[in-house]
Image: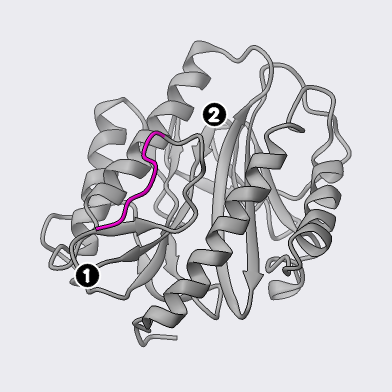
Amino acid sequence: MNEIILKSPEALAKMRRAGKLLAQVFAELDKRMMEGVTTMTINNWVEQYIREALNARPASLGQYDYPYTLNASPNYVVCHGLPTDKPLKSGDIVNIDITLEKDGYIADSSKMYCIGDVTPLARTLVDATYQALWRGIDAVKPGNTLGDVGYAIARYAHQNGFSVVRDYCGHGIGQQMHEAPSVLHYGSPGAGLVLQEGMTFTIEPMINQGSAKTKTLKDDWTVITRDKKLSAQWEHTLAVTANGVEVLTLRDEEPIAQRLA
């Protein structure tokens, strides 16, 4: 799909609702992400919670024949990790990526979890990736470009000694999980698509400790760093507003109560 779909106020209201429900999933998940739990247990709980508690649909389940509700990407897994029966252990960092559909519209978000005592380097990578995400979000407003967004992300990551994965990107989102445009996490100021009010897309930088190069495993899903060094990712779904940006999947613990412009 190449056409940008500008969302109406009615569509944005439904996306905002889906985003709030997804934030609620993460709020409950926070209580369960601990040493000894398996990501398959988390996957099964999330599916049940989305269906039964929220009366919504886990949008990743069955998308492109994907067999699970979420992606669980620990340590040197960059993205698209499959949930497993292996217990999480102290020192692990793991990204949990969840999508949810409510009333025909989809929200997409991911969060890093640090299990037990992680190394200072791992903590720095996780924190820098989160800050890089917000550098990108802060560059979103009408008249700016996707190049401005990517440049802000990559500049921050590089300043902190990390690399930016170029093989995967953010995406437009709405009634379909993947719409136009593609949102690169690197770029040049002023280059690329000009942002307009009503655009909705994800920003989801994948930042690596070492090389940016990746490799897909034989399961055709799991993407890892080629050098087996750590990777981190955070993701939000957002909307371009008349004067700035609204983060549709914003969670209560985040420092900005609401980004409404």
Indicate left or right for 223 with 148 as reference. right
Q: Which residues are magenta?
A: 255-261
As drawn, the label of residue 195 is 1
Residue closer to the observer: 101 or 162: 101
Q: Residues within 10 Å of mark 1 (few under 14, many from 20)?
A: some
Q: Amino acid at mark 1?
A: Leu
State which quadrant residue 198 falls in: bottom left
Return the residue at label 2. 229
Spatial CA distance of label 1 from label 2 is 34 Å
| Residue 193 left/right relative to 181 | left
Query: Relative to 51, is 107 on the left or the right?
Result: left
Residue 242 screen position, x and y as percent: 20, 69
What amino acid type is highlighted by mark number 2? Lys
Picture coordinates of residue 9, whole percent (x, y): 38, 79
Q: Is residue 182 magenta?
A: no
Q: In the drawing, does residue 152 fall left or right of residue 65? A: left
